[in-house]
Amino acid sequence: MSKIKVTQIKSGIKKPQDQKRTLEALGLKKIGQEVEHEATPSILGMVNKVKHLVSTEEA
């Protein structure tokens, strides 16, 4: 399975609670922080939910 690198580019402040929790579940706490995940359907769904707050690239 391929990996994706997820980087937080915008703040979660003043965003709905479910989006804040999704960022937390992805392991993102600060702007500029990067995490690497397997490209599973559940991870891709979480990234899609907060796509306006993060950037992604293939790792």
Image: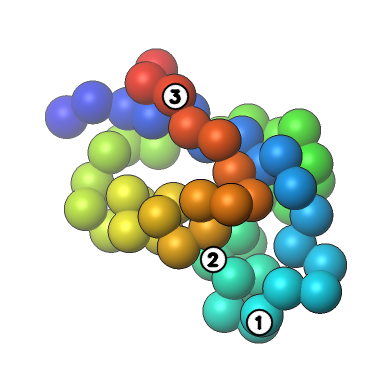
The image quadrant that residue 32 belongs to is top right
Question: What amino acid does circle 2 point to?
Answer: Thr
Q: Compared to 27, does 20 lie above or below?
A: below
Colouring method of the image: rainbow
Residue farthest front in this picture: 52
**Residue at image location 27% in from the left, 38% down from the top:** 39
Q: Amino acid at mark 1?
A: Gln
Residue at the left extreme, as displayed: 1
Q: What percent of the width, then of the height, locates residue 20?
A: 66, 70
Q: Secondary structure at mark 3?
A: strand
Give whichever of discs 1 and 3 has the lower sequence position. 1
Disc 3 crowd, CA 10 A, few/some/many (<14, 14-19, 20+)? few
Badge 1 element: helix
32 shown above or below 12: above
Q: Earlier in the sequence, mark 3 or mark 2?
A: 2
Which residue is labeled 1 in the image?
A: 17
- Real-space CA distance between mark 2 and mark 1, rounded to the nearest whole angstrom: 9 Å
Q: Which residue occupies the extreme top position in the image?
A: 59
Mark 2 touches mark 1? (CB < 8 Å) = no
Looking at the image, can residue 25 be seen?
no
How many angstroms separate mark 3 from mark 2 (CA)?
18 Å
**Camera-nearest residue between 47 and 52:** 52
Check disc 2: other Cα within 10 Å, few if <14, some if 14-19, many if 20+.
some
State the image coordinates of residue 51 (x, y, percent, origin top left): 51, 51
CA gap, disc 1 and disc 3: 25 Å
Residue 22: mark in rendering: 2
The N terminus - image quarter: top left
The residue labelled by disc 3 is: 57
**Pointer 1 and pointer 3: residues touching (CB < 8 Å)?**
no
